[in-house]
Each structure stands twice: as structure tokens, then as C-alpha cells.
Amino acid sequence: MEEIKWFTAQVQACEPAMYRLAMSILSNGDDAADAAQETICIAYEKLHTLRRRDRFKPWILRILTNECYAILRQRQRFLESDALPEPEAPALSEEHQDLWQAVCDLSEQLRSVVVLYYYEGFSAREIGSILRISEANVKTRLSRARKRLRELLEG
């Protein structure tokens, strides 16, 4: 019973991060909610595989990333990539809407590292673990994203 309470508390603490990451990848609120729900179910079933409880957030976000990519693969079977909807903005103050819009205009690869680094506060090493890419690749994507954001916000 204590494990269920702990798991529930951890999931509740991670919900905003899960939604932001899912939105950054899927650009659709319904799909993001589906991915989050499926992730929670998978995480509960696989909780015994979590080695360190202090690593719960990166662990569940890695599961979420896998679920998001599975949804994208399914979606690609039915839609052309240019027919995808515009990403929905999270609840942000008006002054941050322009920045969020610029982040949404980034490619999915750049957008996901920006969300994990700047919005969720993960290190490059942690992001690499979540997205299953090298730390150097994370840093390269962050650099490219910063450059592209500067271009978008100045233009």
C-alpha cells in the first residue's frame, strides 16, 4: 500500500513535465493525454524495474518519450507530416507566449531538448538518457535550438 501511495505522489509531481514533454513531441492535447495515461500504466506495471527511486522522473519521462514516438509512428501511417496540428500552448503568461510559439516552430528534435532542458531543468546527461542520444548530441541540439530561436524571435 505504501508503494502505491509513493507511486501516486511521484506521478502527480511529474504530471506537468509529462504533459509539456508530450506536447513538445506530439503537438496535440488528446494524443499527449493518451501518451501520459499509457505511460502511467506502463510505469506502474514496470515499477519493479526502477533501480533508484530518486531517478523516477527521468525514468518515467523516458517511458513517455517512447510512447510519444509510438504514437507518432501510428499517426504517420494515416497523416502526411504537413497535416499535423499546431502545438497547443501550455498555460503561460502573455509575455512567454511569443517564446513558446518560437519553441513550437522548432523541429521536434530541437523542441524536445529545449523543453527538457529549459522547462524541466534536466541536465544534458539526463536528457541524453531520456531521449537515448549522446550528451554531445544533446548539447549540439541545444546550440542549434538557441540559434534558431534567436532567428525566430528577432525576425
Image (cartoon, rainbow, N blue to C red):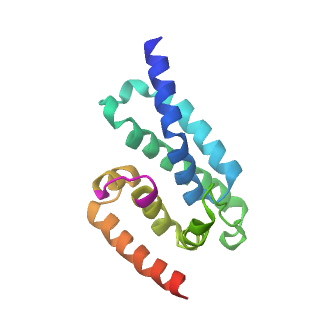
Residue, x 41% and y 75% (percent of image)?
A: 146
- Does residue 7 appear to the left or right of 76 in the view shown? left
Quarter assignment of residue 104 = bottom right
Image: 146 above or below 7: below
Image: 72 above or below 9: below
Q: Quadrant of the C terminus?
A: bottom right
Residue, x 49% and y 85% (percent of image)?
A: 151
Residue sitting farthest toward the top: 1
- Does residue 89 appear to the left or right of 25 in the view shown? right
User: In the image shown, does 55 or 155 lie closer to the viewer?
Assistant: 155
- Does residue 120 appear to the left or right of 75 in the view shown? left
User: In the image shown, does 83 or 89 lie closer to the viewer?
Assistant: 89
| Image coords of residue 77 (percent x, y) | 68, 60
| Image coords of residue 67 (percent x, y) | 54, 46
Image: 39 above or below 135: above
Which stretch is magenta? Answer: 118-124
User: In the image shown, does 126 or 152 lie closer to the viewer?
Assistant: 152
Image: 84 above or below 151: above
Question: How many numbered circles does the render carry?
Answer: 0
Residue 31 included in the magenta stretch of the image: no
Residue, x 40% and y 54% (percent of image)?
A: 131
| Image coords of residue 44 (percent x, y) | 50, 27
| Image coords of residue 49 (percent x, y) | 37, 28
Residue, x 58% and y 68% (percent of image)?
A: 95
